[in-house]
Image (cartoon, grey):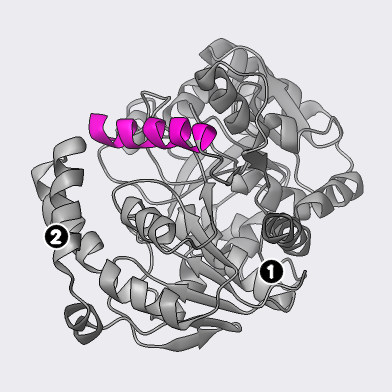
Amino acid sequence: MKIKKCFMKVLEFPNYITIDSVKGLNRNRTGYGYMTIDIATSLAKKGIEIELLTQSYITKEINYQNVKILRRTWKNLFKNLKLRHFIETIKILYTYPPRLLMIPKIFFYNISMGYFEQILRHNNYDIVHIHGIGYYTLPIIRVCEKLNIKYVVTLHGLNSFSDSTNISESGRKIEKDFIINAAANNISTTVISTGIRKTIMNFLSIKDSQNFQVITNSFHINNSNKKRFNLRRQYRIDESAKIMLSIGNIGRRKNQIQIIRAFNKLPLEEKQNLFILFCGYDSKESGFKEEINKLELSSHLIYCGDIPKDELTGFYQQSDFVILASISEGFGLSLIEGFSFGLPCITFSDLDAVEDIFHSDAVLLLKERTDEALAQGIMEFVSKSWDKEKIKIHSKKFTMAKMATNYINYFKHLIA
């Protein structure tokens, strides 16, 4: 069955884009905002008609890589205000008491639903694709069910099953309640890794469920041969030394601080021959830089800042390895991006995406999470001979085209 229109909903997340800024879309590279834009554009390249509506931003109507980002103005919202949406807001506030600062946003999410209803009534969509679950998506689900519109929820990670995520108790309850409701009422849900699906199955105490399907993430990065700068010259790295990349926002969940401690345990010769570059936004509350300075490792452990996506190509091209030490990780985008440049990765075996990304030619897994085990693993990792071409072949499993095909097949199955 041909999909006529696929309505994709991309939502606001901290530190990301304003959707009506094409420059912002091009520069943003981390988290849900980045991945949902990639999903939308990859579907559009396959000939699916994609229209996208933000949930938190006021936007002009623009076209971005054949994705139509719909207009969302204050006039649109106020013209379509409905009393029942105010009542629904009160119900949500009562059921899931939020932090005080969230209350205005929750009102905004809910009173916006009149305009959302108008869009659904005047357009012939086959699927509404909702990214994430939280205060911002509950009203969207409610409207879809009211109008009997088919929808899919994609969970890009789980926040309520780890202490490392900064989420309120009400936020955790929203996620867990959704999972229970999805299982009980056959709500079509996709997750980005086998590990996430297993966590859900364990939580529900069931062996299997057709409601929850795995569609893995993909990478989208320019891996042309053009080097835009000399990484070794810029960071004063010897030609004979190896370069390891740690990419991701600096913080407790990403666990870069353990990489620092493990590096400090390496023999002197190993330290001298290895440089680790950290790329990502630092909230300055992580203690990351302080730990590096305290251990006097700043010449070999280098914070490069929050590198825009289009500049990361040079980092991957001129590096040797990728390391990911996250406490929890829905997928691990830097790993598959590294694969496309022939870079092997080292990570922990208990991460959600390991079953999906693992290949012995491309990944070294560590079973223990101690600093000593990580240090020993790094020594084994950098001394091992890796075949770049085999790693690049493995990366083809995670192309944008492959991801888009998987989503389209899933949508067709639901429509049929």
Q: Position of residue 345 (x, y in %)?
A: 70, 37
Viewer-side residue, 253 vs 238: 253
| Residue 175 drawn in magenta | yes
* Label 2 neighbour load within 10 Å: few <14, some 14-19, many 20+: some
| Residue 258 drawn in magenta | no
- Image mark count: 2
Label 2, secondary structure: give it. helix
Q: Quadrant of residue 206?
A: top right
Reading the image, the residue beneath label 2 is 86
* Label 1 neighbour load within 10 Å: few <14, some 14-19, many 20+: some
Could you tell whether 68 is left or right of 283 in the image? Answer: right
Magenta stretch, residue numbers = 166-184
Give the overall secondary structure of the magenta segment: helix
The residue sitting at 26% across, 43% down in the picture is 284
Give the quadrant of the N terminus.
bottom right
Q: Earlier in the sequence, mark 1 or mark 2?
A: 2
Q: Position of residue 133 (x, y in %)?
A: 40, 46
Q: Position of residue 122 (x, y in %)?
A: 44, 83
Reading the image, the residue beneath label 1 is 222
- As displayed, is residue 386 above or below residue 141? above
> Which callout, 1 or 2, points to the residue nearer the camera?
2
Q: Amino acid at mark 1?
A: Asn
The residue sitting at 73% across, 73% down in the picture is 226
Q: Amino acid at mark 2?
A: Phe
- As displayed, is residue 355 above or below residue 54? above
The residue sitting at 59% across, 39% down in the picture is 275
The residue sitting at 25% across, 61% down in the picture is 109
Give the quadrant of the C terminus.
bottom right
**Residue lying furthest left:** 100
